[in-house]
Image (cartoon, grey):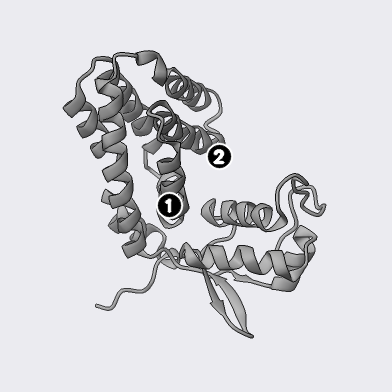
Amino acid sequence: MRMNASGKRWMGDKRTPLADQVYADLRKRIVSLELPPNSSLSRQELSAYYGVSQTPLRDAIQRLEAEGLLDIFPQSKTVVTLIDDSLVRECQFLRTALETEIVALLAADPDKSKIDAAQESLARMEWVLARDRELEEFDRLDKQFHRGLFIAADKQGLHDLVESRSGPLDRLRRLHLHAQGERKPERVIADHTKIIDMIRESRVEDAKEAMRAHLAGTLARLETLTELFPDHFPITAE
């Protein structure tokens, strides 16, 4: 268990329930691979790091277990799960079903100003990629782009549903983003640009196909990523 970058105890937001704060931060650390698969977590050290009692910590851990990000072994240990391809595919199915319909709604809507915020996220992604290729910020803006489309379609609740199930897929996306020799950031920007263009041109079916192709990119690299990062996935029987 590591302290934060400054060596000081993590500080949360007093306006948010402790269990929610711990859940959000611990989930972020798992999804970002700061805590990689098979990491063993000490509840005592987590409690000290976050400055909370065992009750909010237990609630946060149970939520992460339900998402498939932690395995809890009673009276023994808590371990970050390996990346389960069945959960990845389940989330991919959910995202594709919802986001293709989201872009269809936006393409059919004559008010194209609704997607201005999503397009602004895309412009900032281009800026980050051109300047310093800060992948953490790039990934945040990528997610902001997709969230902006849901908000534009007045379907933010569905975005929250997708987010609540996306942990395993987000870890795979992070591996894809960091894979040597991959050009994912450039492809992401090209895909986002095409999606925005199809929406602005009111091309409903083309917008759906552009989103479908975009979301399929990481899953198509699953076998390659398994070979590049074998310690992150279960061992497959020959």
Q: Nearer the viewer, residue 204 or 222?
A: 204
Relative placement, left or right, of 122 versus 203 is right
Q: Is residue 128 visible?
A: yes
Q: Nearer the viewer, mark 1 or mark 2?
A: 1
Mark 2, residues whose alpha carbon is within 10 Å: few (<14), some, or many (≥20)? few
Residue at x 68%, y 52% (from the top left corner): 21
On screen, residue 152 above or below 143: above
Kindly indicate the quadrant of the structure image that contains residue 197.
top left
The C terminus, quarter of image: bottom left
Residue at x 56%, y 28% (from the top left corner): 132
- Disc 2 marks which amino acid? Glu
The N terminus, quarter of image: bottom right
Q: Nearer the viewer, residue 235 or 211?
A: 211
Say which element carries label 2.
helix
Q: Is residue 179 visible?
A: no
On screen, residue 222 above or below 218: below
Q: How many marks?
A: 2
- Residue 76 image position (x, y, % from top left): 62, 84
Kindly indicate the quadrant of the structure image that contains residue 195.
top left
Tell me the tag on residue 136: 2
Say which element carries label 1.
loop
Q: CA distance from mark 1 to mark 2?
A: 17 Å
- Residue 88 image position (x, y, % from top left): 35, 57
Residue at x 61%, y 79% (from the top left corner): 77
Q: Quick one: label 1 or label 2, which is nearer the N terminus?
A: 2
Tell me the tag on residue 131: none
- Residue 95 image position (x, y, % from top left): 33, 45
Question: Quick one: which residue is furthest to the right in this view?
Answer: 8
Mark 1, residues whose alpha carbon is within 10 Å: few (<14), some, or many (≥20)? many
Q: Are marks 1 and 2 in contact (CB under 8 Å)?
A: no
- Disc 1 marks which amino acid? Ser
Residue named by callout 1: 166
